[in-house]
Image (cartoon, rainbow, N blue to C red):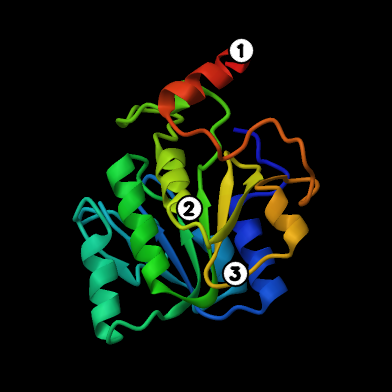
């Protein structure tokens, strides 16, 4: 697979530098993520929560939290409880198992762990082709319906600013209690090579899998 001009961890690192953000957490699974080492190179104290992770799985990177459970909910709740319900991260990167249920659980948990003024980055929010969006796992390239969970998450929070960077299968960026400039709020989808360009081919207004399939059939 050809590396995109701007990868998911590049976006996380650029946003952390721009806004001088502190503690960072990745939420992922053994079949997603795969780029934690890039984050650790720049942020040695970065933490990682990995779910759906059986004993014996080891990619050589640090596991701050890990569980065999099929969702992240138990661990995110435990982190919140340990901090007396207070959010404790400035950046959370979410690369979920791509079912709707797992993606929705990860998004809710990540946002609860995010401090006011923090940023959540979500991978696989803008699939290029409907054939990648099976709701159930398939071997090979599979983006599932994370994009649907992302759309539902942001559209249910009308006061939340967000956009999608059109690179690396789409990286959603969600700001918690931070208002973007008015011009930035007008354009929710940004190209990787120009972070404020209107008129991009895809956007986050796709409200259903069937609608997405109709819109992308000609390009698949």
User: CB atoms at circles 3 and 2 under 8 Å apart?
Assistant: no
Tag shown at residue 41: 3
Mark 3 and mark 1 lie on one chain; the one further toward the N terminus is 3
Q: Earlier in the sequence, mark 1 or mark 2?
A: 2
How crowded is the residue under tag 3: few (<14 C-alpha within 10 Å), some, or many (20+)? Answer: few
State the residue lying farthest toward the front.
158
Residue at the image position 28 percent from the left and 59 percent from the top: 72
Q: Quadrant of residue 129?
A: top right
In the picture shown, does residue 124 fall above or below 109? above
Residue 86, given in percent of the width and then of the height, sits at 35, 83
Residue that badge 1 annotates: 218
**Which residue shows up at 52% across the image and 33% down it?**
206
For residue 209, above or below residue 96: above
Is residue 108 visible to us here? yes
- Who's the residue at 50% across and 57% down the image? 158
Numbered disc in front, either 3 or 2:
2
Disc 1 packing (10 Å; few <14; some 14–19; many ≥20): few
Of helix, strand and loop, which one carries label 1? Answer: helix
């Amino acid at each position: 697979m050809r590396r995109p001009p701007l990868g998911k961890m590049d976006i996380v690192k650029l946003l952390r530098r721009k806004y001088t953000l502190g503690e960072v957490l990745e939420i992922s699974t053994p079949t997603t993520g795969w780029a934690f080492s890039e984050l650790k190179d720049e942020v040695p104290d970065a933490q990682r929560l990995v779910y759906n992770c059986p004993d014996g799985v080891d990619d050589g990177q640090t596991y701050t939290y890990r569980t065999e459970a099929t969702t992240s909910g138990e661990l995110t709740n435990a982190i919140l409880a340990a901090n007396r319900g207070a959010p404790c991260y400035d950046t959370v990167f979410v690369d979920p198992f791509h079912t709707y249920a797992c993606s929705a659980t990860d998004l809710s948990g990540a946002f609860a762990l995010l401090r006011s003024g923090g940023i959540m980055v979500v991978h696989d929010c803008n699939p290029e082709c409907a054939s990648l969006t099976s709701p159930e796992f398939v071997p090979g390239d599979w983006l599932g319906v994370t994009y649907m969970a992302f759309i539902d998450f942001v559209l249910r929070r009308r006061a939340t600013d967000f956009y999608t960077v059109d690179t690396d299968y789409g990286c959603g960026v969600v700001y918690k209690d931070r208002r973007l400039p008015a011009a930035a709020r007008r354009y929710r989808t940004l190209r990787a090579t120009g972070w404020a360009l209107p008129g991009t081919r895809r956007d986050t207004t796709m409200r259903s899998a069937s609608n997405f399939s109709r819109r992308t059939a000609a390009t698949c």
